[in-house]
Amino acid sequence: MAILWSQRVGDTRYEVRAAGSSLRLYNNGILHSQFSERCPATGSVWDLLWLPGLFRIDGMPRRILLLGAGAGTVIRQLTSVYGPLDITAVESDPIHLEIAREHFGVTDSMATLELADAAEFVGRYRGPPFDLVIDDLFGGQGGVAARARAFDGAWFRKLKHCLTRDGILSINFADRIERRASVVGSLFGSGKRFRCGFELRAPGIENIVCGLLPFNAQSADLRAHLQATPQLSALLRRGRLRFSVRAMKSGRSG
């Protein structure tokens, strides 16, 4: 794996590496972003982050808030498949945004990049609500990635104010321990804003992405909508877009 660019800022060493046709961003050895111009699917967690949006019968939402932009993997994936979308991407690390623009090819036409702390941005946001909010706030120590902010009731209430009434929420957890420590299992069910929830996983990684939907759905709905998008259907046939999905039970942490 060739190192194309590196820089040390304080205690953090940033590296952009090439692995085959893909670019990868590492912070102190932790992989933060990955994208290939040849194939929008990464085979990893970034594919899962936007899949909850495809439970909607009318396809991918047009207004998207991405908390934790990294070097822009999700931005490049979505615009590669769907063309122009209204994406606002929030990132607290200015080096990440520099890398997104200069190495990962993220342009102003693809997304509005906001250099800000996610909690501060969400707390002061008063603009039009979003159809899909993706919470991918991650840091890590000792080469191990972990959520940068606990998904508790207070954080959920802030995110909720950024969503349309029929908006979808997607949350990335490092593993089942983080998932069980969160309040996600108590946020959906009969009489609640979110009617159902799903867990998505990819082979070979511990991450669990939870999608909360304000309507009733089945896992078959997601696969049907993927099949209806020619580029994604082709990735499924070639085994490049690999994931498992299961419905969560309301009120349970397991």
Image (cartoon, rainbow, N blue to C red):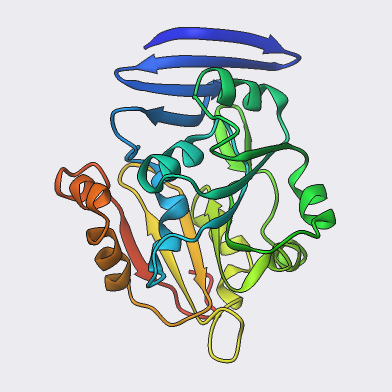
Task: Residue 253: give x, y in percent of width and height.
Answer: 53, 70
Instruction: Specify whether 55 is left or right of 140.
Output: left
Q: Nearer the viewer, residue 45 or 40?
A: 40
Instruction: Specify whether 187 is left or right of 38.
Output: right
100 over 124 or under it: above or below: above
Q: Quadrant of the N terminus?
A: top left
Q: Nearer the viewer, residue 23 or 78?
A: 78
Q: Nearer the viewer, residue 45 or 98?
A: 98
98 over 240 or under it: above or below: above
Task: Residue 11: give x, y in percent of width and height.
Answer: 72, 16
Residue depicted at x 31% and y 20%:
21
The residue sitting at the left extreme is 237
Quarter of the image holding residue 38?
A: top left
User: Can residue 28 be spotted in the picture?
Assistant: no
Task: Residue 234: give x, y in percent of width and height.
Answer: 19, 47
Task: Residue 36: give x, y in percent of width and height.
Answer: 35, 28
Residue depicted at x 51% and y 80%:
250
Instruction: Specify whether 75 is left or right of 140.
Output: left
Q: How many marks?
A: 0
The residue sitting at the bottom extreme is 191
User: Can residue 198 be spotted in the picture?
Assistant: yes
93 over 210 or under it: above or below: above
Residue depicted at x 39% and y 64%:
59
Instruction: Specify whether 48 is left or right of 148.
Output: left
Residue depicted at x 22% and y 52%:
230
